[in-house]
Image (tube, rainbow, N blue to C red):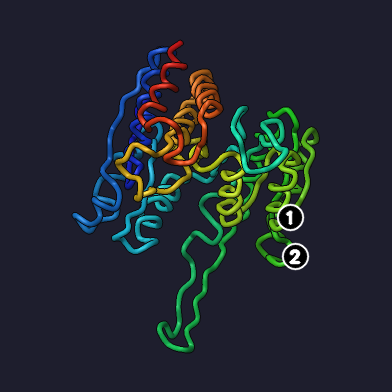
């Protein structure tokens, strides 16, 4: 496999280094050949050159099998420049139309929900990843005046909605519970989520073995805290997916274990920890790398090496359950030591 590596900003390079360390251990155990191509993309590069994505980067990334991504964001760069110019652009350019976020509380990890353990929190969020409010449609009139109007348009296509929902039903049909929930807001978003609801029901008719349900996003947020065990697969749009997956990270023990994938099942996919750059602890060796390592496991799983991916997830679960706290700086060991421990478990 040829892997494009984008460490990014802040603590991104630290956690990606540990992810690559673990990938190398998995490669030795499962007889894989992994070749890395590193890309200098992020805030420092932008401040040096003025280019968000340097010439030729997209062409080069198009030739890899998968992308291992760290984090993007810089305190000296206006918010939105790097996020739209790098993360959202990569998702669109490579048509990574599925954002996949497992929400799983590992055994031994103490989450914030009283009375809930690993048997209660084990579901997956399937988020549409290229449309909705994130397409950048809209604009201003009378900007900077007292009559200013700002418009942000949500763009939802039948094609984009259907392929996302069908992916979610396929996933649900392969899981033990075979249950899917559409998270929407049909009582208010009467155009876009009417489309989502109709497609959800139509596609669902092809999967008689999958039980389906609908819940307003308000209820989903409440139930994720009160009764997360009711969820198995959750499918939703871009904006709501962005929000509820951060809530999912909180109930599974924090951003330190929250891994995610931006999938194009027919093309180049990108794998990343869902946390930010954490510039306040960058370079201190305090950041938890388990989310990035888990993302590396997903990279192998969704690129035809499921046994290697499963080995990484099992090692991550064991290490996560042994740490005194998953909060950055309270792991009881350095970032590199966490990566070493995961690697040792894989090599056994």
- The tag on residue 71 is none
Is 325 displayed left or right of 123 in the figure? left
Which tag, 1 or 2, sits closer to the chain's start? 2
Instruction: Residue at the far left: name it.
Output: 48
Q: Mark 2 highlights which residue?
A: 187
User: What is the residue that sits farthest to the bottom in this orientation?
Assistant: 146
Residue, x 37% and y 36% (percent of image)? 15
Foreground residue among 35 and 6: 6
Camera sees residue 264 = no
Residue projecting furthest to the top: 348
Instruction: Give x and y (percent) for residue 292.
Output: 43, 35
The residue at the point 38 percent across, 41 percent down is 70
x and y percentages locating residue 248 in the rendered image:
60, 45
Q: Is residue 224 visible?
A: yes
Which residue is identified by label 1? Answer: 219
Residue for point 29% across, 39% down: 60
Q: Which residue is nearer to you in this view: 169 or 239? A: 239
Give the structural element (helix, strand or loop) at label 2.
Answer: loop
- Residue 348, x across and y down, in percent: 46, 10
For the residue carrying disc 1, how many other residues have a C-alpha within 10 Å: few (<14), some (14-19), or many (20+)?
Answer: some
């Amino acid at each position: 496999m040829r892997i494009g590596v984008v460490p990014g900003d802040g603590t991104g390079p630290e956690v990606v280094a540990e992810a690559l360390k673990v990938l190398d251990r998995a490669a030795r155990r499962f007889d894989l050949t992994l070749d890395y191509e590193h890309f200098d993309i992020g805030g420092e590069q932008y401040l040096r050159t003025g280019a968000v994505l340097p010439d030729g980067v997209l062409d080069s990334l198009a030739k890899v099998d998968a992308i291992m991504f760290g984090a993007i964001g810089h305190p000296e760069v206006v918010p939105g420049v790097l996020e739209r110019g790098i993360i959202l652009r990569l998702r669109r350019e490579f048509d990574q139309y599925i954002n996949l976020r497992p929400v799983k509380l590992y055994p031994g990890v103490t989450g914030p929900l009283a009375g809930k353990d690993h048997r209660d929190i084990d579901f997956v969020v399937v988020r549409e990843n290229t449309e909705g409010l994130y397409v950048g449609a809209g604009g201003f009139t009378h900007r900077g005046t007292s009559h200013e109007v700002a418009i942000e348009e949500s763009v939802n296509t039948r094609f984009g909605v259907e392929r996302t929902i069908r992916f979610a039903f396929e996933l649900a049909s392969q899981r033990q519970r075979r249950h899917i929930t559409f998270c929407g807001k049909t009582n208010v978003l009467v155009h876009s989520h009417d489309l989502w609801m109709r497609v959800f029901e139509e596609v669902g008719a092809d999967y008689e073995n999958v039980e389906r349900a609908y819940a307003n996003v308000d209820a989903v947020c409440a139930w994720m805290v009160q009764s997360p065990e009711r969820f198995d697969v959750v499918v939703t749009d871009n904006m709501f997916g962005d929000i509820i997956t951060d809530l999912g990270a909180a109930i599974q023990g924090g951003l330190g274990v929250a891994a995610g994938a931006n999938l194009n099942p027919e093309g180049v996919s990108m794998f990343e920890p869902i946390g930010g750059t954490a510039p306040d602890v960058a370079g201190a060796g305090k950041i938890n790398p388990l989310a990035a390592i888990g993302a590396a496991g997903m990279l192998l799983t969704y690129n035809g090496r499921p046994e290697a991916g499963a080995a990484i997830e099992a090692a991550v679960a064991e290490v996560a359950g042994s740490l005194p706290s998953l909060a950055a700086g309270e792991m009881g060991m350095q970032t590199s030591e966490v990566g070493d421990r995961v690697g040792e478990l894989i090599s056994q």
